[in-house]
Image (tube, rainbow, N blue to C red):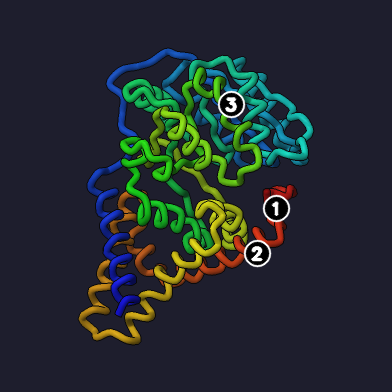
Amino acid sequence: MVLFYIIFFFLILRFTVTLFNYISNPKLTGSPRQYHDLVSVLIPVRNEEKNIGRLLQSLLDQDYENFEVLILDDGSTDQTAIVCETFAKHDPRITVIPGKPLPANWLGKNYACHQLSGLARGKYLLFLDADETVGAGLINHSVHRIKLLRLSLLSLFTNQVMVTAGERLVVPLMHFILLNLLPLRLVRLSANPAFAAASGQFMLFEASDYHRHQWHEQVKQQVAEDIAIMRLVKAGGLRGEALLANGHISCRMYTGLFEALNGFSKNLLAGFSNSIPGLLIYLMLVMAGPVFIAIYLDLSLLFFALTLIVLSRILSSLSAGQNLALNVLLHPLQMVALLVIAILSIKHHLSRSATWKGRKIAS
């Protein structure tokens, strides 16, 4: 009976968190005025020839004028540098910088971001990934938010673009886990560093705070550097906020099933603070719990449990701007994908064998 109570408590708790996120609507909103502060857009790139042009064009289409774009080419072996230089020749706001050799005690992206921050001149530092597309008002809306609430860090969870069936089996898990476990509004409203969430796909810093604390240097060996930085911001008594992008920025993270499985496996365990028991308990409650209920409880309680699961998927899908019918229909297969990702993540952690873009990333 104790196990039954735990399973049902966790189901109800997850639904309550998802409902809170849906009702509180933690999304980036528009700005009532136009700002003119210099914003440094900082983009680390490594073999991104297929993506970087789309991002740069979307930045040039912004209604925000006072920005610079610094691109650090981190050892690309494709045509990334040529694509970037072509844009730089036509717009003086764009600068391409060759990256320095990676030191032994750094992870690649963290070191690239650290190098970019040292070259930036802006009042605000905006770190973006190369596989994104930004909407016309993104920079101005974000600057307004950071000024209005006197934030040191604003992070956005981007809208996810999914094309293949494999992507739809894996990518929605990111928002599902996030909105199921963490009331996003508490990232800003609670001073407790335990309520920390962030996405490295969009990190906007108040530059003076960033330069004072050198946050990427502090987390130079962290795989989930985004969450670690948000914890440092909050632990230092500064303000941070994490919001859903609300359509202002989108990203196609992966292009197929195996790439998505590998990509998420490098971050999943890190999101649970590298606690294997914590991840296993979560998997047991999320996956084995409903099966246990189906075997040992009557139909009315099973129907109640399934209703909570379906409603959670509907609400999280609506909040994330995803196809709710597909997410509900594919939920069992997505849970199988989650199990595979967890197994890969634990394997990489124990063997220190995780790689991304040709580099070992396990710390």
Q: Amino acid at mark 1?
A: Thr
- Looking at the rendered structure, the secondary structure element under dot 3 is loop
| Residue lying at 51% horizontally and 27% vertically, measured from the top left | 126
Q: Amino acid at mark 2?
A: Lys
Rounded to the nearest angstrom, the CA distance separating label 3 from label 2 is: 32 Å
Q: Earlier in the sequence, mark 1 or mark 2?
A: 2
Residue 141 image point, x, y percent: 36, 26
Q: What residue is pinned by disc 1?
A: 355
Position of the N terminus, as image quadrant, is: bottom left
Q: Quadrant of residue 234?
A: top left
Mark before the other along the chain sequence, 3 or 2? 3
Vertical side of 321 occupied by 256: above or below: below
Question: Label 1 vs label 3: CA separation?
Answer: 25 Å
Q: Amino acid at mark 3?
A: Gln
Answer whether residue 245 is visible to the viewer in this image. Answer: no
Comparing 5 with 81, the one in front is 5
Frontmost of labels 1 and 3 is 3
Residue drawn at (32%, 65%), measured in percent from left and top? 10
Q: Which mark is residue 214?
A: 3
